[in-house]
Image: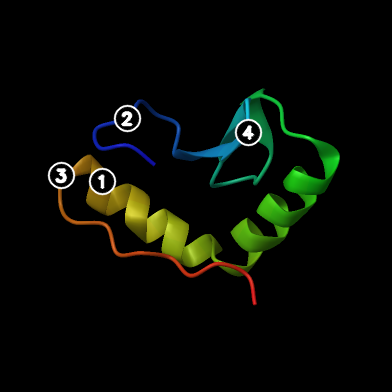
């Protein structure tokens, strides 16, 4: 997630040379692609942390500090 990024609310998932923009609302890839295994982990993580991602988006839009969101266990 980048400060003052464009709408709609999304985050960037990067794996090696691959990058995808993922919608926070629908948890679908909006642009780009990830390898199947990486996408499986990203989508699981995003589902678990959906509310935190939405809150982080709101903070980023106001240039406030974004707290770290933990990874999968």
Which mark is nearer the camera, 3 or 4?
4
Residue on which disc 2 sits:
5
Disc 3 + disc 4, Cβ < 8 Å: no
Which numbered marker is on residue 16?
4
The kind of secondary structure element at disc 3 is loop
Disc 2 + disc 1, Cβ < 8 Å: yes
Residue on which disc 3 sits:
63
Q: Quadrant of residue 61?
A: top left
Q: Is disc 2 surrounded by few (<14), some (14 to 19) or many (20+) residues within 10 Å?
A: few
Disc 3 + disc 1, Cβ < 8 Å: yes
User: Left of 33 or right of it: where is 48?
Assistant: left
Residue under the image location 61 percent in, 30 percent down: 20
The span from disc 2 to disc 4 (Cα, nearest Å) is: 22 Å
Q: How is the image coloured?
A: rainbow
- What residue occupies the far left of the structure in this picture? 63
Say above or below: 25 vs 8.
below
The span from disc 2 to disc 1 (Cα, nearest Å) is: 8 Å
The span from disc 2 to disc 3 (Cα, nearest Å) is: 10 Å
The kind of secondary structure element at disc 4 is loop
Q: Is disc 3 surrounded by few (<14), some (14 to 19) or many (20+) residues within 10 Å?
A: few
Q: Quadrant of residue 15?
A: top right
Residue under the image location 48 percent in, 70 percent down: 70
Reading the chain from its start, which is encountered first: label 2 or label 1?
Answer: 2
The span from disc 1 to disc 4 (Cα, nearest Å) is: 25 Å
The kind of secondary structure element at disc 1 is helix
Question: Which residue is more in the foreground, 54 or 70?
Answer: 70
Which numbered marker is on residue 60?
1
């Amino acid at each position: 997630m980048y400060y003052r990024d464009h709408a709609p609310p999304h985050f960037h998932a990067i794996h090696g040379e691959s990058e995808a923009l993922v919608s926070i609302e629908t948890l679908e890839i909006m642009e780009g692609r990830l390898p199947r295994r990486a996408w499986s982990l990203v989508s699981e993580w995003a589902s678990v942390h959906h509310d935190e991602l939405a809150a982080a988006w709101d903070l980023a839009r106001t240039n406030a500090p974004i707290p770290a969101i933990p990874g999968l266990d």
